[in-house]
């Protein structure tokens, strides 16, 4: 399992609209991608224009090749991209340990 972490900054004052857009984008577009295993979104308390999007993928390639280079990625960006104040920073992580 691979965890994709996207650090997203949006334009000030657009939180309510972005909250709805990111949920809709993940649940109607990304959820259709092969290898998608789940997600969560967190909004910053001190920086409410900052979001962390966590997406769980079966493999790295499910995200970087199948999704990013496939037809669903432009659909996703059309929904959330207009809110971005700057390009998101995206990294991938492997699980080392976890609590019960």
Image (tube, rainbow, N blue to C red):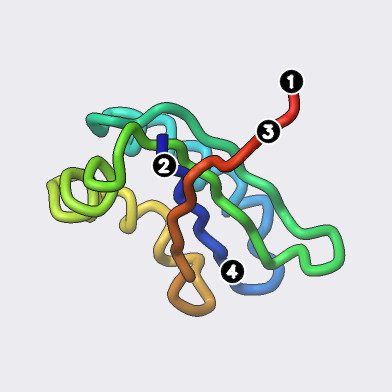
- Do tag 3 and tag 1 residues touch (Cβ < 8 Å)? yes
Mark 4 lies on residue:
10
Dot 1 or dot 2, earlier in sequence: 2
- Left or right of residue 43: residue 88: left
Cα distance in 3D space between marks 4 and 2: 25 Å
Q: Position of residue 20 (x, y in %)?
A: 57, 42
- Do tag 4 and tag 1 residues touch (Cβ < 8 Å)? no
Q: Residues within 10 Å of mark 3 (few under 14, many from 20)?
A: few
In the displayed structure, 30 sits above or below 87; it is: above
Mark 3 lies on residue:
98
In the displayed structure, 26 sits above or below 68; it is: above
Q: Residues within 10 Å of mark 4 (few under 14, many from 20)?
A: many
Cα distance in 3D space between marks 4 and 1: 34 Å
Q: Residues within 10 Å of mark 1 (few under 14, many from 20)?
A: few
Cα distance in 3D space between marks 1 and 2: 19 Å
- Do tag 1 and tag 2 residues touch (Cβ < 8 Å)? no
Which residue is nearer to you in this view: 74 or 94?
94
Question: What is the total number of numbered labels drawn onto the structure image?
Answer: 4
Label 3 residue SS: loop
- Seen at 44% across and 75% down, the residue is 87
Q: Which label sits in the foreground, 3 or 4?
A: 3
Q: Residues within 10 Å of mark 2 (few under 14, many from 20)?
A: many
Mark 1 lies on residue:
100
- Seen at 41% across and 34% down, the residue is 1
Mark 2 lies on residue:
2
Cα distance in 3D space between marks 2 and 3: 14 Å
Q: Position of residue 44 (x, y in %)?
A: 76, 59
In the displayed structure, 65 sits above or below 95; it is: below
Q: Which label sits in the foreground, 4 or 1?
A: 1
Label 1 residue SS: loop
């Amino acid at each position: 399992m691979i965890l994709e972490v996207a650090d997203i900054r949006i334009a000030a004052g657009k939180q309510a609209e972005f909250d709805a857009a990111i949920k809709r984008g993940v649940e109607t577009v990304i959820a259709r991608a092969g290898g998608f295993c789940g997600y969560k979104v967190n909004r910053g308390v001190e920086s409410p224009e900052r979001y962390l999007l966590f997406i769980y993928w079966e493999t790295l390639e499910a995200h970087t090749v199948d999704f990013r280079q496939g037809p669903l990625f432009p659909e996703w960006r059309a929904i959330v991209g207009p809110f971005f104040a700057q390009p998101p920073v995206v990294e991938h992580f492997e699980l080392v340990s976890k609590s019960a």
